[in-house]
Image (cartoon, grey):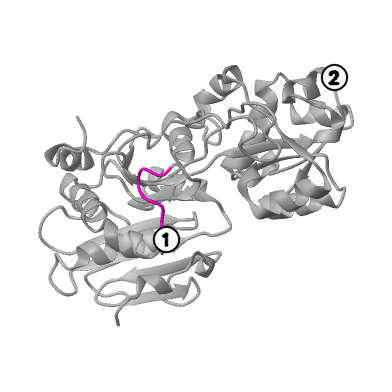
Amino acid sequence: MSCNLRRIRSTAMLAAAVLTVSSGIFFSSAQVPVPTSDRFSLDPAPPAAEGGAVHLVFSGAVADSARIAMWLFESIQGEYPPGFFRGDLVAFGASGPERSVRHVAEGRAHLAAASPVAAAMAYNGTGLFTKANPQLRGLFKMPYRDLVTLAVREDLGIRSFGEIVQKRIPLRMLAVRPDGGSVRGFLTAALLEAYGASLEELESWGGQVLAEDGGAEALARLAAGEADALLQQGPLFSTPRWKKTYQQIPLRVLSVPDRIIRNLAPYGFRKFERILLQGEYPGVVEDVTAVDFSDTAVLASATLPDPIAYQLVRAAVETKSEWESQYPGLAPPDSKEFGRYGVNPREMWKELGAPLHPGAERYFREKGLMP
C-alpha cells in the first residue's frame, strides 16, 4: 500500500489515532489494533542507531502533525531493508501540542511537533510544566508566520490593555480560558498577570473571559454583541472576515508593549518579528507590537541516537520540495506574508524552544547552514 501525502489533511486528525509507516501505510482509530510483528512493538524504547530494526513513535497534535510525520517517515524508510523500519503517529487532535511534548519528555515518544513556546515551557519547567525536562531537544522547525491578535471595540475608546486593568473596565473578552491546559489558555492568564491583574480580579470588577478558540467564531460573536474584545491566535486583522466585521463594528488592534513581552519571555513567548505599521490594516490606528506565535518545531528526546537525528534532519532539508508541493501557491522563503511559506534551511535550526540535538547540529554545520 502506498501513501499519497496530499491525501493527508489536518481535518483527518482524530481525537486519538495511530498512523503506521512500515512496508505500508495505515491510519486507524486507536480502537483498531495496530499492525505489529515480532520485530516491532509500541514500546518507544530508544531505536537502534545502526543495524536491526528502527521504530520511531511520533506524537502530534498540531494541524500539520500527520503531514510532517508521513513526510519524514516516507523520506527515510527507503534507507532501510524492507520491513526494517516502522513509524507510528499517535495523534491527539483535541488535547493540544502540550500533550505531545509531554510524551517526548516522559519517554513515551521519540518525536513530537509543537510550537516553540510549548517546547520552551517544557524544557525550562515553566508555564504549563511544573518541572524542567532537560532531555528535550529540537531537530528543526517548519515555517509558519503567526501572532496573537488583541483587539477591542473602537467605540469603547480604549487605547491599551493596561487601561482596562487600571480603570477596572468590565470588559467581555473572547479568549481561550486558562483552565484548559493549553499554551493559548496560559497566555490569557499570563498576559493579565504581566499587566498586574488576574482572571479572578478581572471577574471581580465585572469583566469576563468568554471561552473561544477560533478567530472567525470570535469575530462573529463580537459582531453579534456578545463581547467587547478578543485575544486570539492569528492575524485576524488581515482576513476578509475582519474587514466585514470592521464595517459593522470598528475594532482597534491593541499593541503589547515591549516591557509586557519581556514579562512573558520566561514562558517562551517573544515579540513578533516586525511592527504592524499604522494604517497597514483596518483597525491598526497606531504602530503595533504583538506576541509571536510562529512556526512548528519538530522535537526529539536526547536519547534519540545522533545518526537517526541526522537522518531525519537531512530528510527534512533535502526533500523540502516534497513538503512544499503539498501547498500550491506557497509564498517564497523570503516572504513576509502571514501563514505558511517556503522552507529556508538556514533558518530551520533557530528558535526551537529547546537546545538543538547534536545529530541535527552536525547536519546543519556539515552543510554550511549554520555558523
Residue that mark 2 sits on = 167
Identified by mark 1, the residue type is Gly
Spot occupied by residue 52 in the image (x, y as percentages of width and height): 13, 63
Q: Residue at x 65, y 28 (%)?
A: 191
Left/right placement of residue 126 relative to residue 149 reads left
Quarter of the rendering containing residue 196: top right
Q: Nearer the viewer, mark 1 or mark 2?
A: 1
The disc at residue 337 is none
For label 1, the SS is: loop
Q: Residue at x 48, y 33 (%)?
A: 121
Identified by mark 2, the residue type is Lys
Q: Quadrant of the C terminus?
A: top left
Q: Residues within 10 Å of mark 1 (few under 14, many from 20)?
A: few
Residue 43 visible at all: no
Residue 322 magenta-highlighted: no
Q: Residue at x 26, y 68 (%)?
A: 40
Which mark sits nearer the N-terminus, 1 or 2? 2
The residue lying furthest to the front in this view is 279
Q: Bounds of the magenta span?
A: 329-335
Q: Is residue 25 above or below residue 244?
A: below
Q: Residue at x 29, y 63 (%)?
A: 322
The residue lying furthest to the bottom in this view is 1
Q: Is residue 276 above or below residue 113?
A: above
Spot occupied by residue 358 in the image (x, y as percentages of width and height): 21, 37
Q: Nearest the camera: 73 or 233? A: 233
Spot occupied by residue 1 in the image (x, y as percentages of width and height): 30, 82
Left/right placement of residue 309 relative to residue 143 reads left
The disc at residue 329 is 1
For label 2, the SS is: helix
Residue 239 visible at all: yes
Q: Residues within 10 Å of mark 2 (few under 14, many from 20)?
A: few
**Separation (CA) of disc 1 from disc 2:** 47 Å
